[in-house]
Amino acid sequence: MLQPKRPIGLANANHRMLRKISCTVVLLLAGVALAPQGVALAQPASNTATFDLAQHPTNHADSLWVVVNKKRPLIPLKYAPVTSKPKFALPSTNNPYGRQLAKPAALAIVILANAMRAEGAGDLVLNSGYRSFGEQTYVHNRQVQRFGLEAGEALAARPGYSEHQIGLAADVSALGQGCVIQFCFGGTVGGKWLRENSWRFGFIVRYPKGKTPITGYDYEPWHLRYVGTALSRQMRKDGVTVLETFFGLPAAPAYRH
Ligand SMILES: [Zn+2]
């Protein structure tokens, strides 16, 4: 798994140690605790009458537009997509851990990586991609056993609730630019380029800064979600950064209990 040298914004040594586990597994207690409850968004935020919000369902695990969060588990919970290794130009650099993604994301991330390199933003590194229900179960159980339910779940998403399980999420960094799976990645050349350009290739930065009360996740500048260019372009056009807001879905600051 990932071993960033110096996690930022975490309160104590235990958290620093645990930050070594990979991203969507990691939720910050502070963000969850401060999140207001019951924030419901009744109307979709897309303001373009011609955009068809029903092109792909948001509640099917195999849909390009599925919205999975702490209030929207995958159905079925053990959903497993067909995945493959992206065919990167520089496999040992771009995919040193041999990660896999669902097919549309696997194709698109290669184009994204090529453009990132060509435009001088660095060599993309795919740190984490698809994670199975079983892998997520292992991580979740380990953290809950070690730290108890509340603290453990602040660090590890429940199996069936992770975007990585649909194969459309990628935790990326840029070779040699540091801040791997850290907030400061957003300030690197690669992180800035991804924030400004991922939409061109069908990706969004799924957990933007300041949206924790809606997404339930702290800022994760490294976590990209593939949604396809039709949606990523429309979100860009509308100035909407969060899937829940775009589709008018309820905020998901915490799990149902
Ligand atoms: Zn992630």
Image: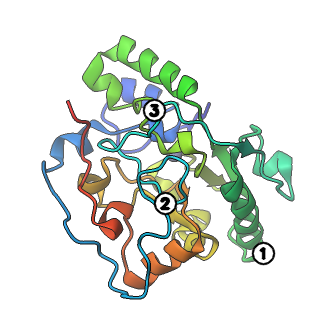
Indicate which disc residue 118 carries: 1
Q: Earlier in the sequence, mark 3 or mark 2?
A: 2
Q: Position of residue 176 (x, y in %)?
A: 70, 53
Could you tell me which quadrant the N terminus lies in? top right
**Count of numbered circles on the image:** 3
Indicate which disc residue 77 carries: 3
Q: Quadrant of residue 13?
A: top left
Q: Position of residue 34 (x, y in %)?
A: 16, 46
Left or right of 30, for residue 169: right
Asked if disc 3 and disc 2 are in contact, CB closer than 8 Å, the reply is no
Q: Secondary structure at mark 1?
A: helix
Q: Amino acid at mark 3?
A: Leu
Q: Quadrant of residue 135?
A: top right
Left or right of 175, for residue 142: left
Could you tell me which quadrant the C terminus lies in? top left
Label 2 environment density (alpha carbons within 10 Å; few <14, some 14–19, many ≥20): many
Instruction: Give me the C-alpha separation between circle 2 and circle 1.
Output: 29 Å
Asked if disc 1 and disc 3 are in contact, CB closer than 8 Å, the reply is no
Q: Could you tell me which residue is drawn at 37 percent across and 11 percent down?
A: 145
Q: Position of residue 180 (x, y in %)?
A: 57, 47
Q: Position of residue 23 (x, y in %)?
A: 49, 41
Q: What residue did someone put label 2 on?
A: 65
On screen, 180 above or below 246?
above
Nearer the viewer's eye, disc 2 or disc 1? Answer: 2
Q: Is residue 11 visible?
A: yes
**Front in this rendered view, residue 226 or 28:** 226
Label 1 environment density (alpha carbons within 10 Å; few <14, some 14–19, many ≥20): few
**Front in this rendered view, residue 193 or 77:** 77
